[in-house]
Amino acid sequence: MKYFAVFFFILLPIFVFAQEKENSATIQGIIKDDNSGLVLPAVNVINVNTVKGVITDEKGAFSLEAFANDTLHISLLGYKSIKVKVTNDWIKNKTTTIQLTQKAYALEEVVVRPYVLTGYLEIDAKLIPTRENYRYSISGLSEGYEAGEYSPSAFGRVLGSIFNPADMLYNFFGKKPKELRRLKEMKKDDTVKNLLASKFDRETISALLGVSKSEIAEILERCNYSEAFVKSANDLQIMDAINACYEEYKILKR
């Protein structure tokens, strides 16, 4: 009886994995411009649930493994990003057509304000703002994107957030363990990684983590990343920064 129980628990994960593979399906789709009807190549399609992604070919077509009720995040520069739910009908029919809408951009007035220097070093040093970048991290890139040491108050601020139930950081890290575990998975998929490295709009991170863009900025501020970094970093760097802060959270929470 004991040997049977051991044998059963050895086979159980294999059986569960087989069941999951059986319930998943390779879905297909064609993405078009909703105005012209033309197919759209190079569209990024990411399964938010599995954190796997693909890019449409020259015919606007893609194929991706998914489960029923999975959410696909679809984005292309110049078009409005959308989320699409994988339905049983889609899995049954294998393919579907998805339409994207072009964005309308309004040009804003640009005001250039050069620094007015006096020629006196002591005065000019106070007029020119300095960047207070306290942290460094490299997300598979050839060079770092923020310089310096930790701010003297960094540890205290993160620690205070972690143990304050009313704090935004406490609630984010405490209530989204599933989404945060995806952070490491994101970097394993080249399509997702390359997409994040080329974007600065926070849309994909927002979809993958289930938070708003403003919340992303607040999370990084609570983790003591500088305002300059939050505004200038690409999405891959932002994702890596959140992951670094989450790893600190897990250590301090023990």
Image (cartoon, grey):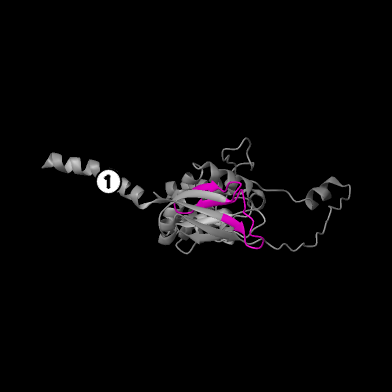
* Name of the residue lying farthest toward the right: 119
**Residue 211 visible:** no
Name which residue lies at 46% across and 55% down: 173
* Name of the residue lying farthest toward the left: 1
123 vs 71, left or right, is right
Other-residue count near label 1 (Cα within 10 Å), few / some / many at <14 / 14–19 / ≥20: few
**Residue 97 visible:** yes
User: Which is more toward the observer, 131 or 215?
Assistant: 215
Position in image of residue 223 (x %, y %): 55, 52
111 vs 186, left or right, is right
Residue 135, quarter of the rendered image: top right
Position in image of residue 227 (x %, y %): 65, 53
User: Magenta segment range?
Assistant: 31-60
Residue 156's place in the image compared with 147, above or below, is: below
- Residue linked to disc 1: 15
126 vs 93, left or right, is right
Which amino acid, mark 1? Phe
Position in image of residue 74 (x %, y %): 56, 55
Q: Quadrant of the N terminus?
A: top left
User: Which is more toward the observer, 109 or 115?
Assistant: 109
